Amino acid sequence: MCELVVKLSNGKEIPITEEVLAVMYKYVRSIYTLEELARDLGLENWEEAYDFVKRFPAWVAWTPSSLFNYMKRRLCVGESQ
């Protein structure tokens, strides 16, 4: 199965998993600081969290997880053909 990742400017890659989606949904829909985001994603500091937010696809943050999983499966199937 293919893995969708967000590549940060420092070279770190963060795979978009169910856990990362849950944290991002919480971030975009509530009062949630970059420090909290960094802690929950296991990033070094708020600056790395800011870099992650800048590079995270906006459409994913507002897409229901079931639709995202469907789109991910479709993208991965198209990649393997």
Image (cartoon, rainbow, N blue to C red):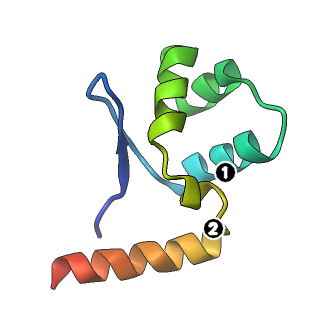
Horizontal side of 13 relative to 36 (left or right) equals left
x 72%, y 40%: residue = 27
Tell me: 54 left or right of 35: left
Q: In the displayed structure, does residue 3 sit left or right of residue 42?
A: left
What is the x, y in percent for residue 72?
42, 72
Question: Residue 37: image x %, image y %?
Answer: 64, 29
Of residues 67 and 50, the one nearer the viewer is 50
- Coordinates of residue 19 in the picture (x, y in percent): 59, 49
Task: Please give the residue where the numbered disc 2 appears in the rendered image.
Answer: 65
Q: Are marks 1 and 2 in contact (CB under 8 Å)?
A: yes
Badge 2 amino acid: Ser
The residue that disc 1 covers is: 22
Observer able to see residue 43: no
SS assignment at label 2: helix
> Which of the labelled discs sits on residue 48, or is there none?
none
What crowding class fits label 2: few (fewer than 14 Cα within 10 Å), some (14-19), or many (20 or more)?
A: some
> Please, which residue is most extreme toward the right here?
31
User: Could you say whether the residue bearing mark 1 is in a helix, strand or loop?
Assistant: helix
> Can residue 8 be seen in the rendering of this structure?
yes
* Residue plotted at (54% across, 25% down): 50
Quadrant of the rendered structure where residue 61 is? Answer: bottom right
**Image vertical order of residue 43 relative to residue 17, above or below:** above
| Quarter of the picture holding the C terminus | bottom left
Q: Name which residue lies at 29% across and 70% down.
A: 1
Q: Indicate the amino acid at tag 1.
A: Ala
* Image point (66%, 18%), residue name: 35
Looking at this view, is 45 or 40 the one in front?
45
* Number of marks present in the image shown: 2
- Is 64 situated above or below 45? below
